[in-house]
Image: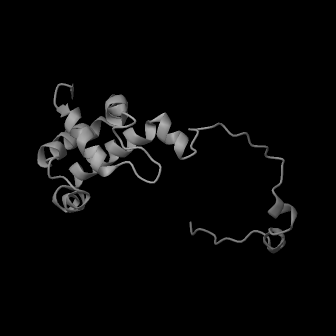
Amino acid sequence: MTVADNTAIIDVDRLEQMADIMLPAAHGMPSASEVGAVNSYLDEVLGWRDDLRQPLVEALAALDPATFTVERLSAFLAEDEDAYTALTTVVAACYYLSPVVRDRIGYPGQVAKTYDPFAYTEWVAEGLLDPVVERGPIWRKVPE
């Protein structure tokens, strides 16, 4: 399977193999392929960060999934920082978009929180800011 636009073709199967090496199943977490991270979310991630498309293609061309290791990934940073950044960013973003992964780490997604500007937190009520208030405003006047 490939994802293409006018400038770059991404080999999704190759990317998924590398994602599994970067994010294997461990410590109760699924691997990238177990949650379909790359297949499900690559288009969405590249829709947000199309600037990563060409460096990702370069990373996939430079690295062979058959011999790819995490150690090789570390060395790749020194060889091509842009390609390394694209590969690691895309793989991580795809993985953490998975509802299965988000559920396992206890992340519900962005949640609107209400704020009452008239409610004082405990540390304000306990007087922790009193010395600052008593001191009064201090600043240096900016020369004109």
Query: Relative to the observer, which residue lies in front, 29 or 50?
Result: 29
The answer to whether 120 is drawn above or below residue 127 in the figure is above
Report x, y in % for residue 133: 82, 68
- Quadrant of the image for the C terminus? bottom right
Number of dots carrying numbers: 0
**Which residue is at the front of the view, 126 or 16?**
16
The x and y percentages for residue 2 are 20, 27
Instruction: Name the image quarter holding residue 127.
Output: bottom right
Q: In which quadrant will I find the N terminus?
A: top left
**Which quadrant of the structure image shows residue 72?**
bottom left
Side of 98 relative to 38 (left or right): right
Residue 86 appears anywhere in the view: no
Q: Is residue 45 left or right of residue 112?
A: left
Residue at the spot x=22%, y=34% of the render? 13
In front of the other: 38 or 139:
38
Residue 11 in sight in this render: yes
> Could you say where residue 50 lies in the image, as x and y percent from the top left?
29, 35
Q: Give the colouring mode of the picture.
A: one colour
- Residue drawn at x 81%, y 69% is 128
Rendered residue at 45%/54% (across/down):
27
Give the quadrant of residue 140.
Answer: bottom right
